[in-house]
C-alpha cells in the first residue's frame, strides 16, 4: 500500500478556500492522488478530502501539520491530517453470531482492512474460537453474572487498556449506556439488521416478515444515544419473496450485514466519512 | 399473446389437494404452461396458480368453472378462473406528476400491459395532455371547488360508469376516504414514494433527505384505510449519496416509482398477486 | 435551474494545476457548486470538472474564456467552458421500437433532460405518432427505397440543417457508415441491448437466452467504427431466470435500455463524461 | 433442519404427468413443503422439484424409490430422490486466494451449507492455515514439482479416496484436463471472476479494466471442456467507476465471487439445479 497523507477538512464554505489549500499543496510539491469536495447547500458547510502522495512532498507529517495551521485558522477549519500507514486500533464487540466477526477478521487478515485488531470483547463465550484462530485476545464479559453498569465498566477498561480508536459492534446484542455513546461519539460503529429507519430495535427480520416487505436490508451507522438513529454510513438491501420465512430472511440478510459493515468500516478507516449533524458525507471510492 | 386459462386457488393446506387439481386438469387434457405453489407454514394456508393452454383443453371457460365446483367445495377453496384474453378495466388516478402516468400509458399502448384504460381521473388539469395523446377520456375533479366527500362521490360515479375493475393511484395526491378503501379492497393500487414502512405520509423524499439514508425507494401496495400500510406488492430502491439534494432524490426516485408500479400492476393484471392478511403472495415470473 | 458555468479540463497531470485553476476561480469570486477530479495513474492524465455559480462571478462567459487561456496553455489543457443554460441540440434516431424514444421525449418534456430536440429521424414510419405528440418534426428515411449511402447522406443533411450537437441512436437499427462514425466521434450515443462486451451485434437477447446467462443488461456507449466497441458511458443489468423466454428478456431488458440511455445522455449533456482513449471518465452525481 | 425428501424429475412434457406424481404423493400422505415446475417450450422438456415432509409420509426412502419406478418408466423420467439429511461430500480446490475458501468454510461451519467437507486440495501451500483452523485435511499438490498429468492423477486419487460427490473450484487457478471435466460433468463447480461470457480466461479484471466497463461480475458455473463456457448457475455484478484501478476491481469483485459461488453451491446441494443442455434450470428459493 502506497503511503499517502490524508487531509480532511470541514468548515464554512468560502471563496478562496480551495485555492488556499491547493496552493499550499502545490508549494510543497504534493501530488494529489484523490480529491473530493462537497458543499452542503442547506447548511453552507464545506467538506474536502485530499489524498496526496507522501513520497515526493517536501515535508514530513509534523511539518505539514504545523505549516497548515495558519490556513486552517484563517478559514475556521475542523481538520485532520493522517498518514495512511498509521493503523487505527479497532476493538470488535460480538455476541453469538459469527458472520460479521469472521468477515471482518478475514478482510483484516488478508490486508483488505488496514487496521490493528488488538482485542475481541463479547458478552457470550462462543466467539472465542474465532479469536483464537486469528490469534486475537478474547475477553468474555459475562453480562449474566454482573450488573450491566459493571459489565460496561469492564468494557471501557479494556478499550482503555488496548488504546482503542474505533469500537465496532459486530452484531453485539447489548445497548450501549448513554455515557459510552457520548464518549465514543463518531467512534462506535454498529451494524443494524434492517433497512433503517424501518424496524428499529429487536427482531427486525421478524418485523420485516410480519410487514411483508419485498426487500430486506442492513444499516451501518454510528452509535448515538438514540437507539438505531445515529448517522448512517452505509446501507445494503436484498430481494426476498413470500416464500422466505423469517429464518430465510435472517440467513439472506447476513449478506447485507457483512457487506454494509465491512464497507462502512473501510470508509471510516480511510477517513472517507465525515459526520455532519445526524448525517454523513461519505467520499467513497 | 397466447390464450390461457388462469386458475387461482387459495385454501387450507391439505394432502390430496394438488393431486385433485392436477388430476382434473389432466382429465381435460390441459397443458400446464406455468404452475406456482406456496404454503404459508405459519397459517397453514395454501396458494396455487396454474396457467394452462386454452387451445387443447376439452372445455370452455364456463364448463371448466361448473365442473371445477365440486373440487373447490371439497377443499374449501377461494378460487377464480380467468381467460387471459379478457382485459381488466383500469382507471388511472393522477395529480400533477406525469412520470408514472406516462409510463403506464406507454406500456399499455405498446401491449406490455394487457388491460383497458377507459378513463383518467385527476384532481388537477395538467394531465389532460397525456390523456389526449393516448386518446383516453380525461376527467378533472376540482377538489378546490367542492367538498372532498363530493369529489370522491364524483370519482365513484365515474368508476361505476366505466365499470372499472382496478383503480391505480399513479401519484394521486389525495387520501381515499375509508368507505372507498373498503369498497375497493384489493382493487386499488397505490405507489408510495418511499421504501415502506419508512417515511409514511407526506414528503417522503424530504424525510429521507433529513434522515440521511443511503438508498431511497418506492413501494407499490394495495390501499387500505391505514395510510401507506396496506399489503405490499413490489418495492424498488436506488442508491443515493450525500451529494444528492432532496430534489435530486425526487428525480432519482421516479425510476423506482415507475418500475415498482408497472411491475406491481402487471403482476396484479396477470392474477399473480394473492392477498393474504396484510401481506401478498406474488407468483412473479 | 440555477445558471452555472461548467469548466471541463483534460491534461497531463502536474503539480500546481489544481492550485492555478482554483486560484483563478477565487480571484474572480467564483462559488464552486461541484468539483470533481480524477487522475489516471496508468496514463498520467488528469481530468477535472468544476461547476461554478454564474451569479456572483466577476466575468461573463467570454471574459472567462479569454482570461483562462494563459492557464490552459501553461498546463497544455484540452478544455471547455459551458453555460449550463445553453441547450445542446439532440437528434433522436429511431426504428420501430418506441420505449427509449418515448422515455427520452418524456424526460425532455418534463425538464429532466436539459436540451433541445429539433428532430426525430427514423428508418421506419411508425414513430411518427410519438413525434407528433411531442410536436417534434419527424423525418422518415426509407432505407428500402434508396441505397444505404444515400440514406445516410439524407441523414447527414438533416443533422446539418438542424445544427445538431448530439445524435442519439434510440434503438436505431442501422449501422452508421465509417465516415459518419468518424465525423460524429464523441457525439453519437448508442444504446446496445446487451451487457457489453457480451453479445455484440444482432439479436443480443437471443444470444443471451442461448448462453443461459442469469442477468441481462444494456450498454450506453459512444459510437465508433468498431461495432458495439466504443467507449462505455453507462451499463445496467436485470436478473432473469430459466423461466424467461427470449421474448421475456426483450421486455425485461427494456428497463435497462431506457435507464442506461437516459442516464448516459443526461451525463453527456451535463458535460460529466470525458472520453479517454476507448474509456470514459464519468463524473456522475 | 427438518427432514424432507426431494424428488427431482426431468422428462418430456406430457399431459397427466403432474397428476400422476401428485396422485402418488397424496396416496402416501405426503405433505408438499415446496413444489417447482418448469416447461422449456423450445425443447418440450419438463422439470419438476418437490420437497416433501419426511415425517408423515407412509414410506421410507427405499420404498418410495421402488414404488415410484412404474411412474418414472411410464413418463420416461430422469429422476432422483434425496433425503435432505444426507450430506454430499464436497472437496474444495484452491490456489492462493482465500476469500472464497474462507467464505464457504464459514458457511459450512455455521450450518448454512449442509454438506461434508472431507478435504481441501491446493496447488499452493498457503491455504493450509484455513484448513487447519476448520480442521479439514489439507493436501498440497505441488504442480511445479511434477507433470500436470501426474498432479491431476493425484487429485483424482484424493477425490476417490474421500468419496467426493462435488468438486468446488474456489479460485483454483489450474485448468482441469478434458478427462476430468468429462468424468465430473455436472459435479464440478467453478467460480469465474467475470460476468461471462465476457472476459473468458486469464486476468478478467484486467480485461474489464481495459474495456472500461461500468459493472464487473462473477459467474458460478459447471465445468466443461470448453473453458469458462459451461452451464451457468449464478451470476452477480457490482458497480465500478473510472476511479477504480484493476486492483480495486479485484477487491470489489471478490464480493461477487463469494456470493455467486456460495449461492450456486447451496442451490446445487439442495438439488435445486438441473442441467439442461448448456443451460440450467435453478429452482431457487
Image (tube, coloured by chain):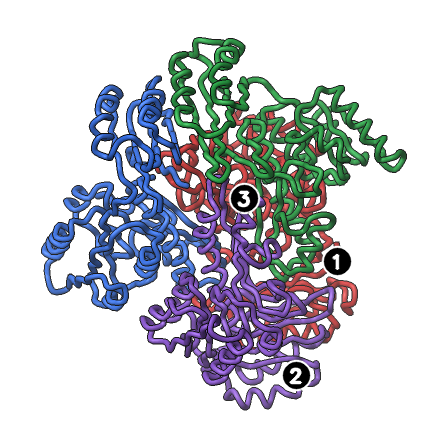
Chain colours: A green, B purple, C blue, D red
Residue located 39% across and 53% down the image: C259
Per the image, the residue denoted by label 1 is D3
Q: Give the spatial CA distance, label 3 vs label 2.
A: 48 Å
Nearer to us in this view, B275 or D246: B275
Number of other residues with Cα within 10 Å of mark 3, as a class: few under 14, some 14 to 19, many 20 or more: many
Q: Which mark is residue B72?
A: 2
In the picture, measured across the screen, residue D33 lies left or right of residue C32, that is right
Q: Nearer the viewer, mark 2 or mark 1?
A: 2
Residue located 38% across and 17% down the image: A23
Q: Secondary structure at mark 3?
A: loop
Q: Give the spatial CA distance, label 2 vs label 1.
A: 31 Å
- Quarter of the image with the N terminus of chain D is bottom right
Q: Is residue C283 visible?
A: yes
Residue A126 rendering spot, x and y as whole percentages: 79, 36
Q: Give the spatial CA distance, label 1 vs label 3.
A: 41 Å
In the picture, measured across the screen, residue A34 lies left or right of residue A92, that is left
Residue D257 rendering spot, x and y as whole percentages: 53, 40
Q: Secondary structure at mark 1?
A: loop
- Given contact means CB atoms under 8 Å apart, are the residues at marks 1 and 3 in contact? no
Task: Tell which circle, 3 or 2, labels the residue nearer the N-terminal end.
Answer: 2
Q: Chain of mark 1?
A: D
Residue D81 rendering spot, x and y as whole percentages: 66, 61
Nearer to us in this view, D65 or A56: A56
Q: Nearer the viewer, mark 3 or mark 2?
A: 3
Q: Secondary structure at mark 2?
A: helix
Amino acid at each position: 500500500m502506497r503511503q499517502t497523507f490524508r487531509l480532511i477538512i470541514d468548515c464554512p464554505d468560502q471563496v478562496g478556500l480551495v485555492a488556499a489549500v491547493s496552493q499550499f499543496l502545490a508549494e510543497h510539491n504534493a501530488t494529489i492522488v484523490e480529491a473530493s469536495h462537497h458543499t452542503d447547500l442547506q447548511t453552507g458547510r464545506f467538506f474536502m478530502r485530499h489524498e496526496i502522495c507522501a513520497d515526493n512532498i517536501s515535508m514530513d507529517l509534523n511539518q505539514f501539520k504545523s505549516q497548515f495551521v495558519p490556513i486552517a485558522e484563517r478559514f475556521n477549519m475542523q481538520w485532520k491530517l493522517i498518514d495512511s500507514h498509521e493503523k487505527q486500533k479497532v476493538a470488535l464487540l460480538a455476541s453469538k453470531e459469527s458472520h460479521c466477526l469472521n468477515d471482518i477478521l478475514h478482510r483484516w487478515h488478508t490486508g483488505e482492512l488496514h487496521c490493528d485488531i488488538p482485542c475481541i470483547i463479547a458478552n457470550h463465550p462462543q466467539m472465542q474460537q474465532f479469536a483464537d484462530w486469528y490469534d486475537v485476545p478474547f475477553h468474555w464479559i459475562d453480562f449474566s453474572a454482573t450488573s450491566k453498569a459493571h459489565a460496561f465498566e469492564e468494557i471501557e477498561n479494556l478499550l482503555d487498556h488496548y488504546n482503542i480508536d474505533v469500537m465496532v459492534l459486530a452484531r453485539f446484542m447489548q445497548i450501549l449506556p448513554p455515557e459510552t455513546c457520548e464518549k465514543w461519539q463518531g467512534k462506535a460503529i454498529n451494524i443494524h439488521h434492517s433497512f433503517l429507519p424501518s424496524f428499529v430495535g429487536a427482531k427486525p427480520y421478524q418485523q420485516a416478515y410480519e410487514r411483508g416487505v419485498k426487500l430486506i436490508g442492513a444499516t451501518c451507522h454510528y452509535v448515538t444515544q438514540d437507539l438505531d438513529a445515529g448517522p448512517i454510513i452505509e446501507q445494503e438491501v436484498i430481494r426476498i419473496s413470500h416464500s422466505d420465512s423469517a429464518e430465510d430472511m435472517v440467513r439472506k440478510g447476513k449478506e447485507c450485514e457483512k457487506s454494509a459493515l465491512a464497507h462502512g468500516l473501510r470508509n471510516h478507516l480511510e477517513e472517507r466519512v465525515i459526520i455532519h449533524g445526524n448525517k454523513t458525507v461519505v467520499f467513497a471510492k
